[in-house]
Image (cartoon, rainbow, N blue to C red):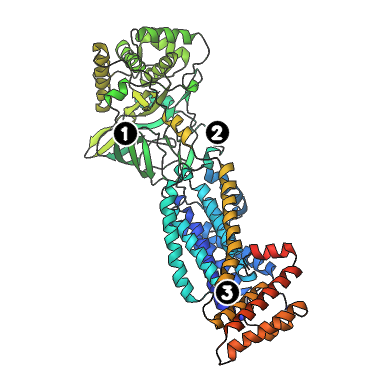
Amino acid sequence: MTGDTRPDETNAGRTLVALAVAAALSAAAGWAFHRVFPVQPLLLTLAPAALVPPVVAALTRRRPLWLSLLLNLLLWSLATIPLYQAVAPSVVADLANSWQALLTTLLPAQPEPRLLVLVHTVTWLAALTAAEIVTRTRTRVTAAVPPFLAYGTALLLSVDGEGDNLGIAAALVVLTVALALVRDDRPATWLLAGLPAAAVLAALAMVAAPLLPIAAEPYNPRQDAELPPPVRVDSVSPLDRVSAWLQIPDRELFTVTAAKPANWRLAVLDRYDGVRWTSGARFQPTGGRVPGDGRPGAADMVQQTVTIGDLPGTWLPAAERPAEVKGVPGLGVDPTSGALLALAKPGKGFSYQVTSKVAKPSKEDLLAAVPVRDPALTAFPPGPQEAEFRKLAQEATKGADAPIKQAYRLQSYLRTNARYDVTAPPGHSLKGLEFFLETTHRGTSEQFASAFALMARTLGLPSRVVVGFRPGEAAGGRFNVKSGHVMAWAEINFEGLGWRPFYPTPGKSGAKDDHDVVSSAIEESERLEGEFTKGGIDKPRPSGKPSAGRAREGDEGLPLWVIIPGTGAGLLLLYGGAAMLLPWWRRRRRRSAAAPEAKVLGAWHQTCDDLGLRAQRSLTAADVVDAHPGTIAHHLRPLADISNFVRYAPDEVAHEAADEAWRRSDAVRRAVRKQTPLKARVRRRMLLR
């Protein structure tokens, strides 16, 4: 015996089949990234990564391992050229950063080479390891472990993606069974019987998987990922542009094709330092999906096609609240506010499509609204102005005994006690707003929205300022939005409803001069405030139900430190059980064969397995005996004679010969166990040899 663990040339066909199965396993594992990337670029990435390593393993199976690894490294590097469409010196740095980049990306991710290189590498490593295990060892299913690890990596990175990976898990199970049957030297009939059985079990697992507690809310590593810090998007805030845009009202900024008018939101500003409103948004890259805000209730889906004109900056306008965006390479989104950002300045004529979800809360929901408790959204800069703003806000909302009524009365107060004037001086500092409220009583939406938001904060109402545009001039399903349509408004955050808009700015010619969207909102607020006054609806009480955010906290799945060890322990138990039961089942099946000839040949095959010769089927009985002198040969030689008699003698075999063959086989087994150290026996058993 030479001790060579590689299959003989006679098993070359089965080795090639096993390599094909290993390639399929790796490809299936890589396909689990379909929840992360679009289909076409993912397929182009997976093809070389899953196919090349098995081909290299087949060509180098008689060569040293280092040669195969060197060739794989070279080919992996060459395969990144079509991925990047150039020689990319940054590929190693991109690979190192791709994990964090994906964890801070909203799925689906843009199919950028710097992100796809992770799929390319993970799948390549899985295929390489699986293929080398197939060609250089005699194990049955160990080659399936690397693809399963790649599959687990894809699962962690695709938790937020659309769809599921249950079908892929079923495919991996079926392919693993196929690999075990091929490596076990089973005839083709075993494959025909084993694969359907495995498919049935996989289908049952797919049905049962959604019922497991972990499947309801899996661990999401993005919850623990460090997001990029808030950054200032443009050198000039959109709120600072309001007065300038109103001075040149005919500048064409963008057009929107939509079925009905809406206010087009541009920027959301939720931080105030006493001088200016800024955005605390943490923009994350996304392939187009915008996370929802968890608000229940009815909503209208609004489809829009936006074409950029002379709009400056990188903010992208859309109706509230965007749910999906198409056509923007390098799109960033703030999950909290839904604000959209192009990472590169869009040029004139650039178009994109947006699907927005416009909430339609019921009258009962509005009247029962309770503000969210968030100190950051009720913060007021230190200074004497806070007391003055609070005094004004309390006077404006005197008699209002509910948060929503306070907001409506504050809105009405500003609309009726100040006038809209595009010639008013710009700015929204505390001193400027104090002058606006107490002296001039005139301003643009910049001052009205800022004053409303700050006065609301003194009442404990979490508020922010939004800069956007009126619907614009309608022309055959298109809305031409010009600089004169710019408008700022305020929003307040309520439990279960999310951010609700308020329009404190009066019309150009008085409180009734509004466009359709604002006027309908004002009429609704006046109607609801009237119902409060009449007492037709009970005073809203704080809801005992937890908010959407708090409700989800209790429903989160098991933490990662429980899932990973638990899963690993479960897999080890399953594997250990298979390792213990499979040899016992194989020996029992051979011993209980009906025909004496089959029992004799089963005793011989069992003895070869005990001697570690399972992969060396081409050895003759004489070769086996010559390779094992001493005590083992004392029982091995008579067994070999009986086996040769069964193979070549025409006479029938008596049951006594079969029993004698098994007595000799058991004796050889005891002798092998006595001579083989425990560590070696355990290793052989765990490798299913």
Q: What residue lies at 63% left-to-right and 82% top-to-bottom?
A: 618
Of 14 and 272, nearer the camera is 14
Cα gap from disc 2 to disc 3, whole angstroms: 69 Å
Which disc number belongs to residue 229? Answer: 2
Q: Residue beneath label 3, please?
A: 591
Quadrant, the N terminus: bottom right
* Quarter of the picture holding the C terminus: bottom right
Residue 150's x, y, as percent? 55, 55
What amino acid type is highlighted by mark number 2? Pro
Task: Please tell me which of labels 1 and 3 falls first in the chain.
Answer: 1
Seen from the viewer's position, the closer of residues 292 and 296 is 296
- Mark nearest the camera among 2 and 1 is 1
Residue 308, position as x, y percentages in the image: 36, 40
Extreme-right residue of the structure: 630
Q: Position of residue 675 (x, y in %)?
A: 76, 70
Say which of marks 2 and 3 sits in front.
3
| Amino acid type shown at disc 3 | Arg
User: Label 1, on which residue?
Assistant: 358
Residue at image x 40%, y 52%?
207
- Indicate the secondary structure of the residue bearing disc 3: helix
